[in-house]
Image: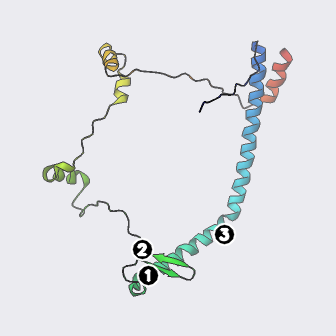
Amino acid sequence: MSKSRIKVNLPTIATRDEAEAVMNELALTANNLRKIIAGRDAAVLRVTEGYAKTIAICEASVSEKTDVLRAWAEASPDQFPKGIKSLALAAGTLGFRTGTPKLALLSRAWNWEKVLTQAQRLIPAFIRSKPELDKEAILSQRDEEILQYAIKACGMKVVQDESFYIEPNLTDTDARQTETVGKG
């Protein structure tokens, strides 16, 4: 399957004045976009605030009813079929899910550093040793001659991308349009 690219013919800019005019159009459009987005965000905020109280009431009710059902389920294990952790009711199912196994500290006397020390002594096969390249340190010392050789010998190179950017001024664009277009 071949990939075909569509080439778009862009208008060319021949002079700085033309570039100024295009940048001005871009700034006007970017400013309009900012105003439109601000208006949309304000409308979304008004709608969200309008529903916030009702949503909070519903969420509180769901939370309360969940707590009541959990308390009933914990107090009524005989209602669950043998070996089953869920119970189908007319309007839904409730039950208990077994989570993924995880390690936890045995007591407050333990912390993970202490656990690691003991594990190194008693079960060393379960201790990880992961070599990792310190890229930040290499980049910070990349100008040293010995490191420049080592970087290449290790199959690396230092690269810096260059990208084009546009930063339109988003204030006073109407006044600037009149000045720039009038100079042509």
Q: Earlier in the sequence, mark 1 or mark 2?
A: 1
Q: Amino acid at mark 2?
A: Phe
Q: Earlier in the sequence, mark 2 or mark 3?
A: 3
How far, Cα to Cα, is label 1 from label 2?
A: 9 Å
The front one of 122 and 57 is 122
Task: Please report contact status of discs 1 and 2: CB closer than 8 Å, yes or no.
Answer: yes
Count all numbered tags in the image, as a single digit.
3
Q: Earlier in the sequence, mark 1 or mark 3?
A: 3
Instruction: Look at mark 3 in the image and give the residue it sits on.
Output: 54
How far, Cα to Cα, is label 1 from label 3?
A: 28 Å
How far, Cα to Cα, is label 2 from label 3?
A: 29 Å
Instruction: Look at mark 2 in the image and give the residue it sits on.
Output: 96
Q: Is residue 84 above or below residue 157?
A: below
Say what secondary structure mark 3 lies in: helix
Quadrant (top left, top right, bottom left, bottom right) of the N terminus:
top right
Say what secondary structure mark 2 lies in: loop
Q: Amino acid at mark 1?
A: Ala
